Image (tube, coloured by chain):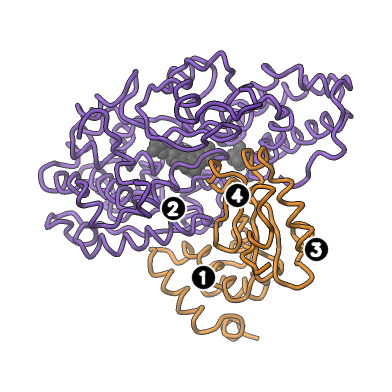
Amino acid sequence: MDAAAKPLTRNILPDRDYATLADYERSGGYQGLRRAVSELSPQAVQQQVSDAGLRGRGGAGFATGLKWSFVPTGEDAPKIRFMIANADEMEPGTFKDRLLMEKDPHQLLEGLIIAGYAIQATQAYIFLRGEYHLAARRLNQALLEARAGGYLGRHILGSNFSLDIHLHAGAGRYICGEETALINALEGKRANPRAKPPFPQVSGLWGKPTVVNNVETLCNIPHILHYGSAWYQSLGRGADKGTKLFGASGRVRRPGVWELPMGTPVREILEDHAGGMIPGYALRGFLPGGASTDFLLPEHLDVVMDYDAVSKAGSRLGTGTMIVLDDKTCPVRMVLNLQQFFAGESCGWCTPCRDGLPWVVVLLQAIIGGQGRSEDLDTLTDLVRMMAPGNTFCALAPGAMEPLQSALKFFRADFEAYITGKTPPLEQADEYY
Amino acid sequence: MSIDAQTASMLNADDIRDIKAEMAHYPDKAAAAVEALKIVQRRQGWVSDAALTAVASLLDVSTAQLEAVATFYNLIYRQPVGETVIHYCSSVTCWMLGADDLRERLCRHLNARPGQISPDGRYTLLPIACLGACDQAPALMVGERLVTGVGAETAVTEILGEQS
Ligand SMILES: Cc1cc2nc3c(=O)[nH]c(=O)nc-3n(C[C@H](O)[C@H](O)[C@H](O)COP(=O)(O)O)c2cc1C
Ligand code: SF4
């Protein structure tokens, strides 16, 4: 595969519904798995993924090989281990994992099986959000094909390694994407997050060592094994390696998702791929990586989509799918919509989040409804501080604060215009979010 | 009524078979909880207290534990709903591109507010978090069918797949 390649989406063709097992095999599918189980030790697979420089695509960018290495090995280590694909994709503005699962389900299965081999898992699960019915059908079909093809089940491809995968569909709740909440959900418990440590790699599903990886992360693995870590490294344009699905939604001419090298500048994504703004609208800002990332401004268009570069600009790469704010959408109302989502999806476990997020919603509704006072902006700032990282039990609430704090900074005049009466109040800030 | 008799009265043989098949996928039966609730809901439309109790005894968990699970999820209904549930995406991109208008058009057509059953018993409209179709906003789900790119020009009857 050449360096300009798009490994993750090579099977996603405009005139093809989805890739069958035969399509997948023709494109080199399951060669990475074959190489792993027949030529490489689990440690060697981990090493190859570490060398490739793959970082988790679930939002936090944690190094994948390093994550796997925390699973205890050796004689005394627990014999039962679990490998889980996080397919809960519910971060507003994110639409990449659905595409990967619907269009090329075997790619995820192969990645999951190789990851399972690397940590010597005894069982794997795909935790799929309940709304993804088409993805569920395609994955279940692919699981049957993979078992029949000898890629899954006992003695995979004639090796000593055996693994099965079960598709576990959820019933819709954002917090289930948080990896420890996901583990509780899978166990059939209410999906509150767990305290860390112990980390799941040591004590996860049913107390056994467990690794949770994002769908897109796993989809990279087959290619790293098949084409090697040096090839994979060559795909990145900047500090980070490989390709990534980047997307844009909102009032751009061609909303969509594209596989591009890590390190692609925002400008290229929004102008070349998304085609720029719809005529009559101008770019006011954007959330670079989903609902729980800080706003960036047009002046940030030349930032490159690398984990560290986006952090330096004041936001996060997150899921890499951007939400575009145009000049005719009110940023205050946009932030209200985001906060209504987060308040509704708070699991209610810890007080700052359970009480804080609804309070944010009430304040924003008052501001938009024309009853805001200038102190309210200070209160909002206090609430941002109250829900800062470390003050809540999980990252949901701190994530919710990212678009709020950046909006208070960049769009303060819009908040103030409601408070001073310059912007006419909205009769009723929407109760249905 | 004994628990077993209650189970038998709330769940039919197919439900029990399907739930047991799900339980077999896990080392702990409780992991089948959500799937079991969905199985009941598929036939009965929603999860009543009696059905919940019956499923709990099948899974060997307390009713309280299963209730804590059932009430947690957007897709498990603890009160009756119409024959088909319509979930319209209310998250950020769909909101920006007209989800509120879509909701109001649906409400007028159904003659029901979100959460209510339409007078003909056929539909309940509910908001849902981002459906992962932001590039084709606004989006909604009619039953299990994802419908995308529904602008102001798309007729509600077309969205619902009804003859106009
Ligand atoms: C509230 C919340 C929701 C999350 N939702 C998802 C999700 O839907 N999918 C996902 O892969 N990671 C999600 N994450 C991140 C996971 O906790 C975890 O970091 C990720 O699955 C790790 O995979 P990776 O190392 O491959 O990136 C979420 C985190 C939080 C705090
Ligand atoms: S921060 Fe929110 S979602 Fe996370 S544990 Fe606390 S209440 Fe639950």
Q: Is mark 1 within 8 Å of ligand 2?
A: no
Residue B161 drawn at (x, y percent): 61, 65
Task: Name the image quarter holding residue A357.
Answer: top right
Rendered view: B18 above or below A394: below
Q: Secondary structure at mark 2?
A: strand
User: Can you tell which mark lies on residue B139?
Assistant: 4
Residue visible at 62% across and 75% down in the picture: B44
Distance (Cα) linking label 4 and label 3? 21 Å
Q: Which residue is mark 3?
A: B111
- Viewer-closest of B101 and A226: B101
Res. A127 mark = 2
- Please report whichever mark, 3 or 1, sits nearer to the chain's N-terminal start: 1
Q: Quadrant of the N terminus of chain A?
A: top left
Q: State which image quarter holds ligand 2.
A: top right
| In the rendered image, the vertical position of residue B118 relative to residue A111, given as above or below | below
What amino acid is found at the position of numbered circle 1 in the picture?
A: Asp
Which chain identifier belongs to the orange chain?
B
Q: Which subunit holds the residue at mark 1?
A: B
Amino acid beneath label 2: Phe
Marks 2 and 3 sit apart, C-alpha to C-alpha, by: 37 Å
The quarter of the displayed image where residue A304 is located: top left
Secondary structure under tag 1 reads loop
Q: Mark 4, mark 1: which one is toward the viewer?
A: 4
The subunit letter for the residue under badge 3 reads: B
Q: Colour of chain A?
A: purple
Residue A65 x, y percent position in the rendering:
29, 33
Say which element carries label 4: loop
Pick whichever, A211 or B121, lies toward us: B121
